[in-house]
Amino acid sequence: MATVTGVLLQSWPDEIAHRLSPAATPPDLSLSVLGVVVLAAALAALVDPLWRVLRLGVTLVHELGHAFVGMLVGRRFTGFVLRGDMSGHAVTVGPPRGIGRLFTTWAGYPMPGVVALGLVAAASQRYAAPLLTALLVGLLITVPRVRSLLTAIVVGLTTAALGCLWWWGTAAVQAQVLIGIALILLVGGWRHLGAVASATTAGSDPAVLRQLSGIPALAWNTTFALTLGACSWGVWTLLAP
């Protein structure tokens, strides 16, 4: 029994190191494999019963986008909530106006596209495992800042799913799943933007940006669309070859 325990303890560092390292070879991204990934992502993002669940993941990326950029510009991230209707709220503490507040407020809608581009770039270049590690660490850091039961469920399930992929998934499966997630985030990012552009309310990001800057909400929505468009083009460029 002691021998078995010793062997397990000795193997743990090697196992973890293996899961922190880039893959030895590029993942299989042949046309047939990508076709299956694209089809699965399209069904997940466009079939309403599935979308009502998956859109919470898009909202999670949106709200953590506010939080991440807020911290980059010197604001303090204190908590966030997700709601089932695609809305959410991330609280960062800092000056009520200024360039930092603008960047923080702006970051939400483009973030699904930015993350999608990062996922595809890492997955297509053998870095799926290191990226999964970074995502898991980031999610664990957010846990003390969860402020609702639904948010805790979404963060918990997302962390568990990515953890299983990180520990048990082969390099090829990790890359393919991350690309599928990226495509869902892209579609979700466009759907979220379409919803806010067609019905801008007083508390929406474009409306808050208008109040902070005096620039019309339409102009801010245009910057969201241009950023998502650039990210979509980037994803296409990476996957097309």
Image (spheres, rainbow, N blue to C red):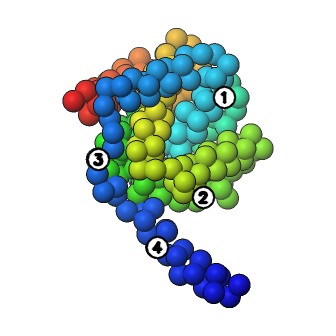
Which of 217 and 113 lies nearest the eye of the viewer? 113
Where does label 1 land, which residue? 53
| C-alpha separation, residue under disc 3 versus residue under disc 1 | 31 Å
Q: Kindly state the secondary structure of the residue where label 2 is placed.
A: helix
Q: Residue at x 44, y 25 (%)?
A: 36
Q: Residue at x 65, y 56 (%)?
A: 143
- The numbered mark, 3 or 4, whose residue comes first in the sequence reads 4
What amino acid is labelled 1 in the image? Answer: Val
Q: Nearer the viewer, mark 3 or mark 1?
A: 3
Instruction: List the single residue furthest toward the bottom.
Output: 2
What amino acid is labelled 2 in the image? Answer: Leu
Where does label 4 land, which residue? 14
What amino acid is labelled 3 in the image? Answer: Pro
Q: Quadrant of the C terminus?
A: top left
Q: Position of residue 235 (x, y in %)?
A: 31, 31
| C-alpha separation, residue under disc 2 versus residue under disc 3 | 28 Å
Q: Which mark is residue 35?
A: none
- The numbered mark, 1 or 4, whose residue comes first in the sequence reads 4
Q: Position of residue 201 (x, y in %)?
A: 59, 19
- The numbered mark, 3 or 1, whose residue comes first in the sequence reads 3
What amino acid is labelled 4 in the image? Answer: Asp
Q: Kindly state the secondary structure of the residue where label 1 is placed.
A: helix
Where does label 2 land, which residue? 140
Q: Specify whether residue 101 is in view.
A: no
Q: Nearer the viewer, mark 2 or mark 3?
A: 3
Q: Position of residue 60 (x, y in %)?
A: 58, 39
Q: Kindly state the secondary structure of the residue where label 4 is placed.
A: helix
Determine the image quadrant of residue 230.
Answer: top left
Where does label 3 land, which residue? 26
Q: Kindly state the secondary structure of the residue where label 3 is placed.
A: loop
